[in-house]
Image: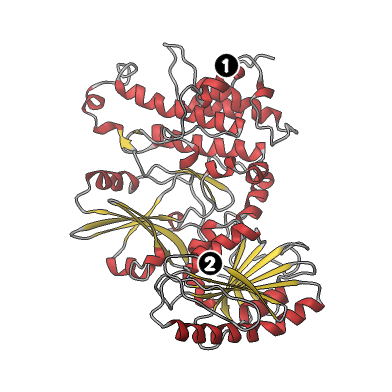
Amino acid sequence: MAGLEPKSTLASPGESVIVVIDANRNKVMVDALAWAIRNIVQPRDTVVVLGLLSEVWKKNACIPLFSGTCKLRLFLFSCFVKWACIEAVWVRLEFSGQGELSPKEFEEELERKREEYQSAIQPFYRQCKKNGVKLEAKLAVGYDPKTITVENAHKFNPRWIILDSHLKRDKVYIYGHVTCNVAVMKEKGVATLMPSRGLASERFSVDRQDNDTEKGADIEQEECHDLAQDSIWVLPTLSSPRSPCWYPLSWRSGFPKVFSFDELEVMTNGFSKEHLLIADGDKIVYDGICQETPVIIKKFSAEDDQAIALLKILSRVRHRNIFNLVGYCSTHDSLALLFDYPCSGALKMYLRSDESAKNLSWKARWYIALDIGAAIRYLHEECIDGPIVDVIVDSWNIVICHGSSSLLNISHTAKWLKHDSFYDELSQDKCQDTESEKRLSADVSAYGVLLIELITGKSEPTYEERTEGHPSLVDWALPLLENGSLDQVMDPRLARSNDSAMIDNMVRAALLCLKRDSGHKSVISKALAVLRGEEFAVTIKP
């Protein structure tokens, strides 16, 4: 199995690398820093060493630190941050939370930790200076480890984040909120790599193969590969959809499955706060690890009829372009649904970011359209229990996943059409003008809006985002497309290049889906045929 070669696909010169160290232990361990300098860091890079003291002093206080002799004062309900130069190693001391120690005890304890941290880092400063590498050391006191790591990642835009082995519990959250490579120390001199989603999207934009007719994939035994003097354990890059470590659980044999409550507790470390993602009324969402693979766990009340109905649908749906169910757990008072972790984020976030949007080539966007169209066709025409409708087809519900697939998330409003009594009573011939047909057409129209989003690079605003007097995305773009003014609509962040046929086919498919003639019948199969260039139902004006 091919792996990631050290020094070849790693950080480019002049970039930053963040090394996160757990400073709570009696002796500061710097294995992660040593590994990073040996395998990742290059001349002219900046290494940011972030030491975390997060398990002490829970009350709210702040620490102004002055150069020279360390003088600390305790302030309640305020915030103060000061930089101090300590033998050419920059340390940023930050503190939130109110201590149970007296100010004097707190000062003494923090000074001891600071000196210990400085002593551990100092040899690497000299080594980095010799190699033309800038080293910045920070000490964050009282902060949530995963939150402060993500904040620093957004600030420094690193190529790599290396996590101390004691911080592996936070790797799923951190990886889900950054776009760079992440390495987690496994043991001394050995790290597990989680390759960047940026690398995946680059590969996705040029190397993706059209497997629209494929309904599944052969599942291999999960493994990791040992490389380069045993210094790296690689989780295969996300750009290869058949890499066994990055097969989502929902694609593997034996899933979906029934989990016990005890298994969920193990995945989430007892439903700890560190794994809590959302707690909004009845909506509670955790992240966790199942079989070395990140998952999302959504908890509902056992009496939640909508969740029960959703479980019945998801347990019968299997498609490579749908956000499939991993499993569920039902107890007397709760129902939990498990899904693969959407590591690469929603399409809307890609379109909103100029950098990400540039990496999403026209070819990649065409494949996204093809993937989601295939998912809708499966829901409308191929489900063995009858059509599934009322899915939310927009860029918020499209997940760019595993470097090669786009997934439609149907875990919100999807319903079986057959459960409506009139569907059972009416024949197909009489169904054209019924509410059933309208609901099928609504999904196809929503797909047309998605195509407009991919063409323009703009996302349809949510109800909350809309402003009075401004036209919707469709009201703005559709007349221009109908009149052949494609250049006024195309995403300006991308050149037209050699993908004109794909762009034109997306436009034709969008016009077909959004056609407003009263006698027009929207069918997803016909839209997909137009998207592939197999038939031209709509002529674009020159």
Whether residue 244 is visible here, answered yes or no, is no
Report the amino acid beneath label 1: Pro
Residue at image x 55%, y 65%?
149
Question: Which secondary structure lies at badge 2?
Answer: loop
Q: How many marks?
A: 2
Instruction: Establish if 513 lies above or below 86.
Output: above
Residue 368 position within the rendered picture, expressed as x and y whole percent measured from the top left: 56, 39
Please name which of the two marks, 1 or 2, marks the residue nearer to the observer.
2
Residue 124 position within the rendered picture, expressed as x and y whole percent measured from the top left: 71, 81
Residue 472 position within the rendered picture, expressed as x and y whole percent measured from the top left: 50, 25
Q: Nearer the viewer, residue 260 or 426?
A: 260
Instruction: Establish if 378 lies above or below 484.
Output: below
Residue at image x 70%, y 36%?
494
- For disc 1, the neighbor class at 10 Å (few under 14, some 14 to 19, many from 20) is few
Report the amino acid beneath label 2: Phe
Q: Are marks 1 and 2 in contact (CB under 8 Å)?
A: no
Residue 78 position within the rendered picture, expressed as x and y whole percent measured from the top left: 46, 65
The residue where tag 1 is placed is 479
What's the distance in space between the residues labelled 1 and 2, CA to CA? 55 Å
Q: Name the quadrant containing residue 245.
A: bottom right
The residue where tag 2 is placed is 80
- Which of the labelled discs sits on residue 361, or is there none? none
Q: Name the quadrant containing residue 86.
A: bottom right
